[in-house]
Amino acid sequence: ARFGPNFRDCFGDDGQLLDQYYDVMSPDDMPEGGSLSNLKEMDDDEEEDEKDEGCVINGERYEPDQIKQLKLMMVLDKDTGQKISLYDFMIKESNEQQYTQFKDHTHQLHHQNNSHRHKRKLSDTFKRMFHGSSHGQDNKEMNRVKTHVHKKQMKQFTDLRLVQSINSHAGAIWTMEFSPSGDYLATGGRDGIISVFRVNKLVRMVSEDGVVDKEHHFALDPTPYRQYNFSSGNDILSISWNDSDFIAAASMDNRVRVYHVTREECLKTFKHKELATCVKFHPNDPKFLITGSLDEKIRLFNIKTGELVSHHDTNHTITSLNFVKQGNLIIAGAFKGKCIFINFNGSEMSDRSTIDVRSKRGKNKRKKVTGIELSPSENQILVSTNDCRIRMYSLSNYSEVCKYKGHQNAQSQLFASFSPNGRFIISGSENHQVVIWNDAALPSDAINHIFPATSIPSKSRSRSGSTSGVKRDKISSYEYFTDSNAPVVTSLFFPFLARRHSGEEIAFPNDAHRSYNSMGSMIITGNYKGTLKIYQSIASPALVQSHV
């Protein structure tokens, strides 16, 4: 059987595990890099819309009829010698020489389309794709990333810049995690390699002119500090750090290995009967780690002695794990859409409670749990599932607090995470984009503190007083940007803010700015092609035009 870390249908009619449980999904199976308007909607109150609504290419929207014309026009790819559609060419990264070779083909498309607006879009698209990199177009436009808002009255990522790109893996990056100290970032992927990068905590924001230099603006050393190589085909599925800079990694050879960042060799290896899908260090006792496996067991290991301390049978196929409540509670996510809460007393585990992660009406049930993240306040958790939804649960009574939608996660192992202050939630998406939500509805008093001279029109508020796009416990307002021409598998906020251009720390004028101003925030993404990209937010929020 061919394995890879995308969970598909797990059980047949006879209850046996199928070979395609871990069948890799090709990028060709993913949606094109379109806008969020063509996401598969699974809302309780809506039917799935299968209509093609067009897509966004390089920040410009193209309607279905325009896309059809682009796909009909064929041009010659200089690199491969094969004919490709003009549509494929437009979304492909290229250089100035390719532009010179293909620019005459735009006249053919102009002849077929009498729309002046469409001609202008094509012309601007080609100029933006090629002229900037070799004709000295100002750097301000070269690394600016266009962000979009959906049902929001305040845009918080008004000026986002791509400042660093690293080709770190030969294939998808399935997992990445910062060390607790923030000094290192570990990434793992399909190529069976763990790469450890040093982090520059004194990184500065780029200035508005967009000039990037390695010394001040690179958040990661582009050369890995350590690389741990597994055998070919052993995808790295999960990574965890402890406070002492030990790294634990689960791979597809049924093993969990332990390393220390200062050492080149593997220190411990823990073999499992079946595939180990996830691993997590205890937050307060660095010698303990837990693992989840396809054999439905959670195992507790002592990395100092190499012993199996205990195990607990959950009767569910485990797909994600996390410790909460200072390590006294374990939460396990299951393939069939459940979260199992397990008491942990230091060596023994016992069942506490189980919840179904699904809509209130029972739709979208039995969808795989792909991630469990603890909030910075440690009183809530984010649960990501394969129904294109993210849900927040209270740890006091295990009730659903809020539900977020806007990204696409129907088959992948995507998971959402918090910003350091807990005010933003971020997730990658199968349609090549990165989506950012506020953790809750933006309060009017916070907006008034940020924009004291502006009154928000009452029509922008819902009956419940929430921000537009919020209906009680559901948040469908967000910001998003296109990361690349491949699915975005992992995305995280850096655990600290970038400094000002002068090297000083950012000082916000009030608590509202400190909570909702994204200036200095840094985002790192890992995509299906093995590329890490780092973005900086360098400006304060702005009101969306319709609300000014």
Image (cartoon, rainbow, N blue to C red):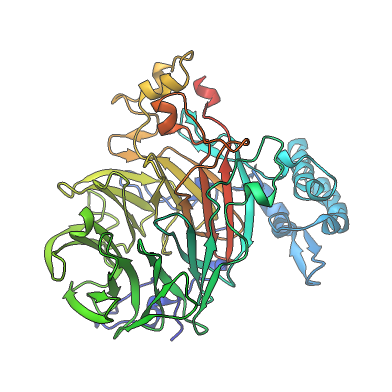
Residue sitting nearer the eye, 476 or 539: 539
- The residue at the point 29 percent across, 86 percent down is 273
Does 89 sit left or right of 518 as displayed?
Answer: right
Vertical order, 75 against 14 (above or below): above
Vertical order, 108 against 506 (above or below): below
- The residue at the point 71 percent across, 39 percent down is 140
- The residue at the point 31 percent across, 24 percent down is 465
Does 381 sit left or right of 141 as displayed?
Answer: left
Location of residue 363 in the rendering, given as x and y in whole percent from the top left corner: 27, 54
Residue sitting nearer the eye, 503 or 258: 503
Vertical order, 331 against 379 (above or below): below
Location of residue 246 in the rendering, given as x and y in whole percent from the top left corner: 39, 69
Name the image quarter holding residue 414.
bottom left
Location of residue 194 in the rendering, given as x and y in whole percent from the top left corner: 50, 72
Vertical order, 466 against 457 (above or below): below
Residue 205 visible in the shown view: yes
Name the image quarter holding residue 87.
bottom right
Location of residue 476 in the rendering, given as x and y in whole percent from the top left corner: 39, 40
Residue 33 visible in the shown view: no
Does 392 sit left or right of 528 as displayed?
Answer: left
Residue sitting nearer the eye, 496 or 481: 496
Does 405 sit left or right of 540 as displayed?
Answer: left
Quadrant showing the N terminus: bottom left
